Image (cartoon, grey):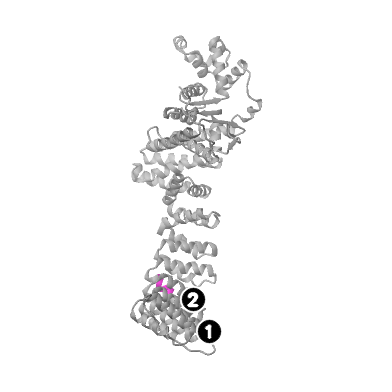
Amino acid sequence: MADPSALTAPKARTASGVATLWVELARAIKGYRFYPAHHPQLQEIINRSFRTWRADLNRHGAVEVILHQGVLSLVHATPNMATHSDELAREFTSHDVSALRITPALTQDGFHTLLEFFADTDSRSNALLKRQKWIQAAAEQGIDIATERTARTERALTQMAENDPLALLEASPNFSENSEELTDDQLDDTDPATLLAELLEPEALEYSTSRSVTPTHDTSTAATQPTARQSLHEHRKAELEALLAQLQKTEDAAAYDCLAAEAIATAKLLFEDGDHDAAYQAILTLSAHATLDAGFHEKQRRSASEALIAFVSGPRLADLIARACTADTSLRIRATQILLQLAEHAVPALLRSIETLQNPDHRSQVAGILIAIGERATPYLLRTMQGNNLRAARVAARIAGEIQNPAAVSTLRKLMTSTDPALSKEASKALVLIGDATAIGALIHALLHEPSAIATQAAYWLGKAQSSHAVQPLADIVQQATLRGDFALAQEALRALGHIGAPEAIPSLLFVLEQRSFFKRQQITDLKLIALHALANIHGDEAKKKLEKWATCEDPALKREARRAFLKRAPGRALP
């Protein structure tokens, strides 16, 4: 049967496509290691990853990748394509994999075998033989896995089994102690190679292998063997996985508290070692247990929630926020859900993130999480708005407006009079967004504020709010500001009345149109032009008649503006 990769000419892979393959494979390995065998989430992860790989293999042909100096490189790529998938590179290193080739003949069973191989964390001597069986099974299903240590071990075991393996066992320093556990019948029934792998310690196995074959790799690879620190790290990871598995099974509340405390302590150490993904698994588990869907009783759910809050703080909370901003949709959604669970406990860090994040999309994502937390975020937002950090106060005011909690009105009302223009603006805008009677009342009250810059800003935002409650106060301020010569405030109030478009504003508009002044002629004319524009936005016959009258006035500028406004209202009607 022809190789499927030969049926069509393979197309060149892109760097982003290769990175997608690595991400999907690494995610599937982690899922295989974390979830129970028949968990629906695991099946979803594996199916998605398998479909991604199958589609790529069908389009581009076989994938062959090598690990060199901690970097995964795609073979036969032009140019040689190196990808920085540290996570997958660690999996290759920990499983002694030097090269991997996956062909279009890949089957779902073969993909499961590959995941089973990488998900295995057994470091005992007999794990070598077990992994060798997986390698052989994978080879029959479109996957070739090349390792350094396993290849040497296979050759050594074959040679020993053909000669006299029991004689070699007798030379092992552990033989006399271990062999006492086996009877003669057991020795007769046991495959010599299997017996050898089970009885020899790793050091003895390495020693016997080195005597049998000549190493084919550079001697410098000895420096890459796991150090004591790496071994401790792997031990902690295994311990955490075991603790999380016990948490899933326990039904005793007291035992759950103890296990959760141990899991948190271990996860903290792993996080400090730089393994943020392992710590994230603890967060995922505690988050799931704190929900009703977990099936735990209330006391355990409360314990899980308390443990989650205690663990997710400081740098771990910052890491969770970073995950909520990632481009990976599923990861972003899950991290966001956990942040919403943390609610007010995550608010300070989320608020700080908005101040420091450079990417506008990330800032929007974090702001959206704060808004979704809602009223539970308000107490901290209020404290921040009342603090001395003006930048943080501006961000808090903006979020408070989006949350639309009336409890913030009193504080926002005070911030409107701030000497910081940006903070005053954010407070005014927030009041508009809240939009209830108390918020609009605060803006109306500000119309009387001195200096008039605050009142002018309030008039602007009342126009944006388009509240009918603001019509009469704005109409009054138009006349007062015109008479005292505060033209900036009068202009903004006129524009606001035009935005609202209420007939009750007509008397004040006519008041402005009837004003005369020799010394302030230009300022009065500017006011009249704005008044005519506002009049055009008011529906009804009365406003139309007033426009028609001013369309025949003697002032050329006013006449032109009135005619334009009138024709906009009655396009088919002729004017004299």
What kind of residue is marked 1?
Gln
Magenta stretch, main secondary structure class? helix
> Image check: 251 left or right of 229?
left
Please state which of residues 60 and 252 is positioned toward the viewer in this rendering.
Answer: 60
Q: Is residue 551 magenta?
A: no
Please state which of residues 488 and 220 is positioned toward the viewer in this rendering.
Answer: 488
> What span is colored magenta in the figure?
439-443
Foreground mark, 1 or 2, reads 1
The image position of residue 102, as x and y in percent, is 50, 29
Corner quadrant of residue 253:
top left
The 10 Å Cα crowd at callout 2, few under 14, some 14 to 19, many 20 or more, is many
The label on residue 522 is: 1
Q: Is residue 286 above or below residue 106?
A: below
Please state which of residues 542 and 301 is positioned toward the viewer in this rendering.
Answer: 542
Residue that appears at 52% across and 18% down: 197
Instruction: Name the quadrant of the C terminus.
Output: bottom left
In 3D space, how far apart are the residues under numbered discs 1 and 2 (Cα atoms)? 20 Å
The residue carrying mark 2 is 456
Residue that appears at 47% across and 83% down: 558
